[in-house]
Structures are given as C-alpha cells and as structure tokens.
Amino acid sequence: MHKLFIIIAFIFSLSVYGQNEIELDDKTYSKIEKLSKKGDKYVEIGNYKKALEKYWEAYNLIPEPKTEWETTTWLLVAIGDANFLSSDFKDGADNFRSAMNCPGGIGNPFLHLRLGQCQYENGNLQKAADELTKAYAMAGEEIFEDEDSKYFEFLKTKIEVD
C-alpha cells in the first residue's frame, strides 16, 4: 500500500474525530470525502490529472480561512503527492509548504519527506536536506524504504545516519 494512503488515513482520522477543530457540516464534509476518494482512485491508476481535479474540487468546498481546517491539511498532502508522483515538483513543493501552515502539518513525517523530495528535484538542496532530515528524525530510515534510494543516499551525505 502506498504511504500516501497510510498518512492520509491518519490525518483523516484526526479530522473525523475532531481534534481541536471546528467540524465541517456533515453535508460539506461528505462531499469533500466523496471527491477525495474519487481522487484517490485516480491516483491508484496513475491518472494524476483527474486526481488533481477531484482534490481541487474538494478543496474548494472548504470554508475560509482554509488554513484552520485539518481537512485542508490532508487534501493538500494528497494534492502535493499527486504533484510529486506526476513529476510536478514545483507545484508539489508549493502545496506541501501550504499544508505546513495547516493543523497537523508541521511534524508530519510524510509531509516533510515529500517536501524534501520536491526540494531536491527542484535543485534546492539545502532545503531538501532540512526537510529530509526532519522526516528521518521523526520516522527513521523506514520512511525511505519505498522511495527512490537517491533521497536517502543524498541525506547520508548531509547527516550521520545510524
């Protein structure tokens, strides 16, 4: 199973159980959830363009200010991951940075991993090292297991790993 689904499930569980969040009304949340699941299905088959359409449609249903909702966090993570998987590293980095400004963003190892990978691919190597170090510090070497080995090899040139 792709790590995205594990991380999204974790973030989703936080929003469902309302940790310090004003809850979205049931009708809006249900629409967001359905659109997100459609987006997830498109990611599974590699149709990232369609996935992004569904994720953005869901995102647009979130009330302002969007940065106050955990729902925004997991949607931006899904959007950023679809960007990353489709090699759109610039938009991926932008969306992961935006997710950092939402509840539960900072300190999410997957978010730091993907932001670091996007920064690496964009040539921002110091920022890549910073984010990959955070992901490693929080989740250990395991977070790199299903990833291209170049990211962990790069990290090992920047920090001492066990």
Image: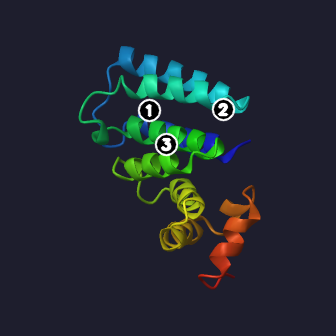
Q: Say which label, 1 or 2, has the lower sequence index.
A: 1
Circle 1 Cα neighbour tier, 10 Å, few/some/many (<14 / 14–19 / ≥20): some
Residue 114's place in the image compared with 47, above or below, is below
Q: Say which label, 1 or 3, has the lower sequence index.
A: 3
The quadrant holding residue 132 is bottom right
Circle 3 residue? 11
**x, y percent for residue 143:** 66, 60
Amino acid at circle 1: Val
Q: Residue at x 72, y 67 (%)?
A: 150
Q: Residue furthest bottom?
A: 160
Q: Residue furthest front?
A: 123
Which mark is in front, 1 or 3? 3
Circle 2 Cα neighbour tier, 10 Å, few/some/many (<14 / 14–19 / ≥20): many
Which mark is in front, 3 or 2? 2
Q: Tell me how far mark 1 sits from mark 2, CA to CA.
A: 22 Å
Circle 2 residue? 43
Q: Tell me how far mark 1 sits from mark 3, CA to CA.
A: 9 Å
Q: Residue at x 43, y 49 (%)?
A: 94
Q: Tell me how far mark 3 sits from mark 2, CA to CA.
A: 18 Å
Q: Say which label, 3 or 2, has the lower sequence index.
A: 3
Amino acid at circle 2: Val
Amino acid at circle 3: Ile
Circle 3 Cα neighbour tier, 10 Å, few/some/many (<14 / 14–19 / ≥20): many
Q: Residue at x 39, y 53 (%)?
A: 100
Residue 18's place in the image compared with 89, above or below, is above
On residue 16, the disc is 1
**Foreground: 8 or 57?**
57
